[in-house]
Amino acid sequence: MSNRIATGMITSSTLNDINSALSKLERSSEELSSGRTILQPSDNPYGASHAIDLQSQLDGLTSYATNVQDGISWSNTANGAMTNMGSVVQRVRELLVQAGNATYNQSDLNSIATEVSQLTETIKQDANTQYAGQYVFAGTLTTTAPYKQGPEDEYHGNEGTISRSVGPGASVTVNTNISTLLGNGAGSGDGKLLDTLRTISEHLTSGTAEGRAALNSTDLKAIDASMETLTQLQATTGSVTNQLQVASLRIEDLQDSITKTLSNTQDADVAKTTIAYSNEQAAYQAALRAGANIVQESLLNFLR
């Protein structure tokens, strides 16, 4: 017994072939427009899961990279302020050496005292330096100015630490406890920089031989000690910056590596996909032409 091939079967088969060619063409078109071979999880379940994991890692690294750059900016801001303080302290030291000149009279010393008082306020201004609206030397009290302008020299920050996360379980402390350098002024008698500067001003205006003698002895030693403390703080800040820069390079390397792996997992080969698209487009056009001829001939046979 022979099977008869009906016209409807031919038409149905032709339409299926055309739809199949169109489906392949649309797939290639979507891959070209999106640049990816995985358009939905069902295309490659393992690859899709792997891509999601890699993207999650990249997002985490981006967050760490932002923290690192913020930390570097914070440290650079603090170091710039301390560099200015160093210039001021060096100027005070020069004034102390000048004040030891026997030819200077009391009027000269009073003028030097006025400049020292102005320089003291400059140091307090540097101590109130801000980064992104936060006081960098106030500990965790970042909205509170560490020092007030004027005669009050009390430190209004705290000794809390501010850190930036640079990796899983890894963080770097970025803030500097400036009170270890500046202290709380003459009222505290702590012998730190602000106390020393106020004492120098008193000795300059005292008009006594003892006060004048102290300028080039105890006062000069105290200034040198403060300069040493400042140098140590700057060295610590420089070390923090170096740590952050190393972390930044490590993060960049990881980002590059993961990005390449992610690309290999989900990105389409543009050249290969373009060729496939051209072939499928030609196949689809050929299927349309062939289908048109077949359907037209079937209709004529039916009319006959």
Image: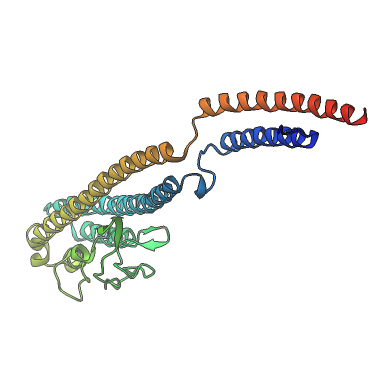
Q: How is the image coloured?
A: rainbow
Where's the N terminus, which quadrant? top right
In which quadrant of the rendered view does residue 301 lie? top right
Which residue corresponds to the image point at 33% horizontal and 42% vertical from the top-left? 252
Instruction: Please identify the residue farthest to the front as the structure is shown.
Output: 1
Pick whichever, 67 or 100, lies toward us: 67
Pick whichever, 88 or 66, lies toward us: 66
Instruction: Please give the count of numbered marks on the rendered protein.
Output: 0
| Image spot of residue 150 (x, y percent) | 33, 69
Along the horizontal axis of the image, is 187 left or right of 72?
Answer: left
Instruction: Please identify the residue farthest to the right as the structure is shown.
Output: 304
Which residue corresponds to the image point at 57% horizontal and 26% vertical from the top-left? 276
Instruction: Examine the rendered structure and indicate whether residue 250 appears above or below residue 156.
Output: above
| Image spot of residue 209 (x, y percent) | 9, 65
Which residue corresponds to the image point at 81% horizontal and 29% vertical from the top-left? 295
Instruction: Examine the rendered structure and indicate whether residue 147 appears above or below residue 215.
Output: below
Along the horizontal axis of the image, is 79 left or right of 206?
Answer: right
Along the horizontal axis of the image, is 65 left or right of 243?
Answer: right
Pick whichever, 229 or 255, lies toward us: 255
